[in-house]
Image (cartoon, rainbow, N blue to C red):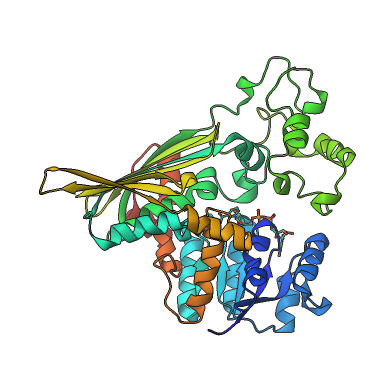
Amino acid sequence: MKKLTCVVLGYGNRGERYSEYATVQSDELEVVGVIDPNPVRKDAAKSQFSLSEDMLFNNLEEFFNKDVQCDFVINSTMDELHYETTMALLDKGYNILLEKPVTSNAKELLDIKNKAEEKGLKVVVCHVLRYTPFYSSIKNIIDSGKIGKVVSLQLNEHVWYGHFVNAYVRGKWNNEDACGSGLLLAKCCHDTDLICWLNNITEPVAVSSFGSKAFFTEENAPKGSAKRCHECTVENCMFNAKKFEIEKDFCPMYTWGKIQKPLEDITYEEKVEFLKTSSYGECVFKTDMNIVDRQCVSVNFKNGSIATLNMIGGTSAAGRHIHVICEFGEIVGYVEQNKVIVRIFDKENIGVNEETVDFSAKVDLTKEDNSMGGHYGGDYYIMRDLVRFLNGEPTSSSTTVISDSISGHMVVYCAEKARKTSTVVFVDEFEKEVIA
Ligand SMILES: NC(=O)c1ccc[n+]([C@@H]2O[C@H](COP(=O)([O-])OP(=O)(O)OC[C@H]3O[C@@H](n4cnc5c(N)ncnc54)[C@H](O)[C@@H]3O)[C@@H](O)[C@H]2O)c1
C-alpha cells in the first residue's frame, strides 16, 4: 500500500485529531502542509509534523499559489467555511476528507456532490460514528440479512450538560446565523446519517419534526441574575462561569480556544479576564443562543420502514442509544457501552435467542496503541479506511463518497423545514424546490 500525503486546512480540534494518524501510522500517512490563519495552530502543526516554513499557509490562496501535490486535503474548518473552501479545493483537483456537516443547505450540498462527480474527485464526509466498531457491526448484521429488513430505527441522543453548555449554549455552535448550523445539523447529522446509511436499501420520503428552545431561556434565569456571571450575586447556580468553566473545565479546547495561546500556557488570571468579555462568561439563560435544546424527528421510508430520533441537550450523561427492529430480530445498545444485544426469533422453538456482542477490545486498541480512540474508535477507523480507500484497496461498508451522505443531510434540512413550518416535508418535493 502506498504511503499517502495530506495537507490540513484548519488545524483546530478536529484537524489535529485526524492528522494524528500520520503520527501513529507513519508508514501510511504523512502531513506535508497546513493552512490556518492562527499562528498558534500553525506552530503546533509545524512542530508536530516537522514542517518547513514554506509549507505553512495562512489561507487557501497562498496554498494554491504554491501548487502543492498531495493525495488529499483534510478540510476541518468550521461549518460556515466548508462550502467555499471545498468548492475551491475541488476546482483545483484535490480529493477531500470533509468535516460534517457538509454545509448548511441543500443547494450547496448538491453543488459539492455535482462538482466532485464532474471532476472525478473523492469527497469523503467525516461521519465518524459509521466507522465505530459499534455502528459498523450493527450495519454488518443488518446487511447480512439474518434478521431481515429494517422495520423501525429508534435513536436517542442525550447531550451531556458539560458538552451542551460549552458547545451549544455558550459555545461556537450556539447561533445558527453565525455558524450556519442549527443543533440538528451540528450535532445530529451523524444520527440522521446513521438512520439513512443503516437502511440504505431504501430511501427517506417524508419527514416531520418538533422542537424548541425551552430551557435555556431568559424566563428560566434565576431571579435577580445578571447577564454576566462575574457581576451576578445569585448563589449556588450550577452554571456559574468561574466554577463551571475554570474549576470544572469540561471542554478546554472549546472554552479557551479563542485565547491565542497553547492551552497549557493560559493562566488562571487570563481565564478570569476572558470570562468577563466572552460568551463563556455569560448567564446560560441570557446568551444569544438561537437554536433548540430539544428536538424529535420522524422519518418515513419508501419501503414502509420508519425511524425516530430524539435529541435532548443538557442531560446528566451523554447517551447515544439505538434500537433497530427488523423482521426477524432486534439490535439494541448504547454506543458508550460499546456492546449490543442481538435478539433473533427462534422459529423452531417459537422463542427468542439473545446474544451480547462486546466491542470494547477493538475500541481499547485505538486508545492504548495510538490514543486515537475519540468517537468510540471512529476517529481512528475513519483514517484507516480512508487511506485504504484512496489506495484503491477494499474498505469497510462505512466508507462512501459524498453521494451516500446526501440522504442523511436532506433529512436534517427537511426536518428543520418541518419544525419551523409545522408541516410534513416530502423529500422529493423539497429537492425539486432546491434544484428549481
Ligand atoms: N466529526 C465530528 O464528530 C465532529 C466533532 C466536532 C466538530 N466537528 C466539526 O469539525 C469542524 C471543525 O471544528 P473544530 O472544533 O475543530 O473547530 P476549531 O475552531 O477548533 O478549528 C477550526 C480551525 O480552522 C482555522 N481557520 C479559521 N479560518 C480559516 C480559514 N479561512 N482557512 C483555514 N483555516 C481556518 C481556525 O484557526 C481553527 O484552527 C466543524 O465543522 C465542526 O462542526 C465534527
Is residue 241 depicted above or below 345 in this figure?
A: above
Taking the image as four quarters, which one is ligand 1 found in?
A: bottom right
Q: Position of residue 257 (x, y in %)?
A: 76, 50
User: Residue 342 placed where, x, y %?
Assistant: 30, 48
Which residue sits at x=50%, y=76%? 388
Q: For this rendering, which residue is in front, 197 or 347?
A: 347
Residue drawn 75% across the image and 17% down it:
234
Whether residue 64 is visible, yes or no, is yes
Quarter holding residue 290: top right
Q: Residue at x 44, y 68 (%)?
A: 399
**Could you tell whether 432 is left or right of 386 in the image?**
left
Q: Position of residue 181 (x, y in %)?
A: 56, 49
Q: Residue furthest top?
A: 223
Up-down: is 66 above or below 156? below
Q: Where does the image place residue 363, in percent across and percent down from the top left? A: 52, 56
Q: Is residue 102 visible?
A: no
Which quarter of the rendering shows the C terminus?
Answer: bottom left
Q: Quadrant of residue 380?
A: bottom right
Tag count in the figure? Answer: 0
